[in-house]
């Protein structure tokens, strides 16, 4: 019985810390450095560093548009798919 309570307490602590970690990854307001021909941001400056925005042709060494503070791109799932 004690091991079940200890496991439940540990799980509760881990789950309560998860939202705080996730909130710290989003940028406040990126400065758009470069745009594509259709007007979407292709490079942003965050904390003085220029970073490529992930697109269909750019998927390595880039930042997800929503994570960069832009209002387009894939949304993270609120659940783990089975």
Image: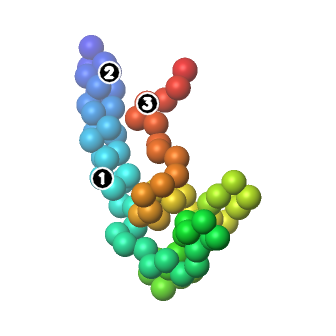
Which of the marked residues, 2 or 3, is nearer the chain's N terminus? 2
Q: Which image quarter is the N terminus in?
A: top left
65 and 37: which is toward the camera: 37
Q: How was this image coloured?
A: rainbow
Q: Is residue 2 above or below residue 50?
A: above
15 and 34: which is toward the camera: 34
Asked whether residue 11 is in view, the answer is yes
58 left or right of 30 in image: right
Q: Quadrant of residue 14?
A: top left
**Residue found 43% across the figure and 30% down from its top:** 79
Which residue is disc 2 drawn over?
Answer: 3
Other residues around mark 3 within 10 Å, as few (<14) / some (14–19) / many (≥20): few
Q: Position of residue 65 (x, y in %)?
A: 51, 59
SS type, badge 2: helix
SS type, badge 3: loop
45 and 33: which is toward the camera: 33
Which residue is disc 1 drawn over?
Answer: 20
Asked whether residue 25 is in view, the answer is no
Which of the marked residues, 1 or 3, is nearer the chain's N terminus? 1
**Residue found 45% across the figure and 79% down from its top:** 31
18 and 79: which is toward the camera: 79
Alpha carbons under labels 1 and 3: distance apart: 17 Å
* Front disc: 1 or 2: 1
Q: Residue furthest right?
A: 57
Which of the marked residues, 1 or 2, is nearer the chain's N terminus? 2
16 left or right of 38 in image: left
Which residue is disc 3 drawn over?
Answer: 79
Q: Is residue 79 above or below residue 61?
A: above
**Residue found 27% across the figure and 33% down from its top:** 12
């Amino acid at each position: 019985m004690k091991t079940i309570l200890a496991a439940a307490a540990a799980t509760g602590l881990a789950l309560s810390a998860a939202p705080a970690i996730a909130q710290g990854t989003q940028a406040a307001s990126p400065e758009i450095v470069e745009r594509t021909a259709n007007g979407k941001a292709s490079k942003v400056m965050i904390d003085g560093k220029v970073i490529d925005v992930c697109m269909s042709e750019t998927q390595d060494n880039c930042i997800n548009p929503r994570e960069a503070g832009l209002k387009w791109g894939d949304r993270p799932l609120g659940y783990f798919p089975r």
